[in-house]
Image (cartoon, rainbow, N blue to C red):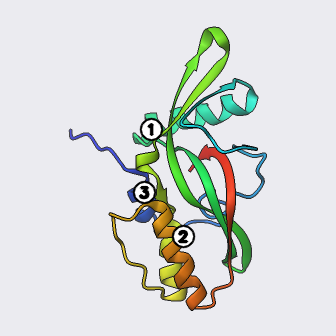
Amino acid sequence: MSEHHYDIAQFIIDLSEIPSSDPLVHVGDHEKGMIVLDEPLLEIQQFELNTAWNAILKTANQHKREADLQSLCLVSQHIQWEYKGKTVSSPLVLTPLNWKIAKGKQQVEIQTQTEQAFVNPFVVNQLIRAFDLKIAENESLSPQESVESIIRLMAECSIPAVISDFSAIGNF
């Protein structure tokens, strides 16, 4: 039996239809399944374990165990736009996170995997499908350069959307 390892970005692309309630489409109620940060996340940062963290880490463990998928990510920007007739806030830039629990201290240590950051493939695919944008897939571009390119194309095509900073941790 061969072992399968899925890259989260490829997994998202492989999904053909994503429901509006999916956190890749709409981060929705920030209290559900996400921890909203008041300040940008440091490369390595510790947080006190609490009920919210325990729930998020339990889901991350489940995804890792069931699909060999690291789903815990930092959202650093989001886009407000229309999807299926509703205004949604979709994560735009996602950065995978590694974590470990320091049991003696009741803390979780989060480490960003900055080199693996990516633009939400759902957003890119939706812009291509719904608005026929010609978004070049250039792997040499950083996520920020990709976002700048998307913003420029959206402005040229008068696509109604607002992109803003938003810092939260959750499973995507």
First in sequence: mark 3 or mark 2? 3
Q: Earlier in the sequence, mark 2 or mark 1?
A: 1
In this rendering, the count of numbered labels is: 3
- As drawn, 43 above or below 75: above
Mark 1 to mark 3 CA distance (whole Å): 17 Å
Residue 123 marker:
2
Amino acid type, label 2: Val
Residue visible at 69% across and 55% down? 166
Residue 9 got which mark? 3
First in sequence: mark 1 or mark 3? 3
Q: Amino acid at mark 1?
A: Glu
**Residue at mark 1:** 66
Please give left or right for residue 62 compared with residue 69 in the image. Answer: right
Q: Residues under labels 2 and 1: Cα distance?
A: 25 Å
Label 2's element?
A: helix
Q: Nearer the viewer, residue 134 or 62?
A: 134
Instruction: Give the amino acid at mark 3.
Output: Ala
Can residue 126 be seen from the camera position used here?
no
Label 3: element kind:
helix
Q: Using the image, tell me which numbered label, if any, was put on residue 128.
A: none
Residue nearest the observer in this picture, 20 or 169: 169
Residue 9, how many percent across, how many down? 42, 57
